[in-house]
Image (cartoon, grey):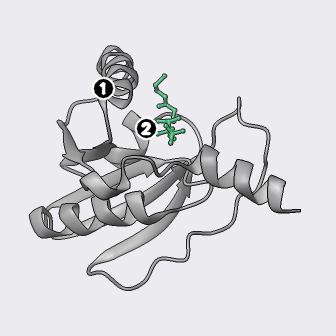
Amino acid sequence: MRIAVFPGSFNPWHDGHEDVLKKALKAFDKVIVARGRNPDKTKANPPRPNIVWLGNFEFQEFDGLLKDFVVKVGACAVIKGLRNENDFRYELEQQYWNEDLGLQIPTVYVITDRNLVHMSSSALRMLEKLKK
Ligand code: PNS
């Protein structure tokens, strides 16, 4: 079974993530949506993603390095979503770090739907605060 890991903070999960997950599910037998604990981000317990059923996926949380998590779950690829060139620059740096740390599997980049390029977790968090 070809398993891919789709890692992120997902705080919160949004339509852009859902779009990437849908596309990844067309290419892999199973996708693990994996929330990594980011020690720099303050909110300790972001909400569990409320993902509608899209196919064979599961949600997991992990501590530590992504390269260790992918080995643990037997993944053959990492999935990352790209909205624009800023994401690309950020993800390229992440990829080089992951490779330096020993990631042995490819990272597959999925372009987000053009109608969702403005969607971001940080914008949603800001809106949530302003509505209060
Ligand atoms: O949505 P984000 O905040 O870009 O997701 C970040 C995440 C969880 C993918 C990233 O922080 C991560 O991979 N964390 C695990 C730690 C790790 O392996 N870091 C290596 C690159 S420095």
Q: Residue at x 36, y 47 (%)?
A: 117
Q: Image quadrant for the C terminus?
A: bottom right
The residue closer to the viewer here, 68 or 16, is: 16
Q: SS for tag 2?
A: helix
Q: SS for tag 1?
A: helix
Neighbours of disc 2 within 10 Å: few (<14), some (14-19), many (20+): many
Q: Position of residue 28 (x, y in %)?
A: 14, 64
Say which amino acid is labelled 2: Leu
Q: Is disc 2 in contact with disc 1, using a CB cutoff of under 8 Å? A: no
- Work out whether residue 35 can be spotted: yes
Say which amino acid is labelled 1: Glu
Q: Nearer the viewer, mark 2 or mark 1?
A: 1
The answer to whether the beta carbon of the residue marked 2 is less than 8 Å from any atom of ligand 1 is: yes
Q: Image quadrant for the N terminus?
A: bottom left
Q: Residue at x 59, y 44 (%)?
A: 63
The residue closer to the viewer here, 116 or 102, is: 116
* Left or right of residue 22, residue 29 in this image: left
N-terminal of the pair, mark 2 or mark 1, is 2
The residue closer to the viewer here, 50 or 16, is: 16
* Left or right of residue 33, residue 71 in this image: left
Neighbours of disc 1 within 10 Å: few (<14), some (14-19), many (20+): few
Tell me the distance, in whole angstroms, between the alpha carbons under discs 2 and 1. 23 Å
Residue tagged 1: 85
Relative to 95, residue 69 above or below = below
Q: Position of residue 9 (x, y in %)?
A: 56, 47
Instruction: Residue 21: name its quadrant.
Output: bottom left
Q: Residue at x 40, y 23 (%)?
A: 90
Instruction: Residue 104: name its quadrant.
Output: top left
Residue tagged 2: 66
The residue closer to the viewer here, 61 or 48, is: 48
The answer to whether the beta carbon of the residue marked 1 is less than 8 Å from any atom of ligand 1 is: no
> Disc number at residue 21?
none
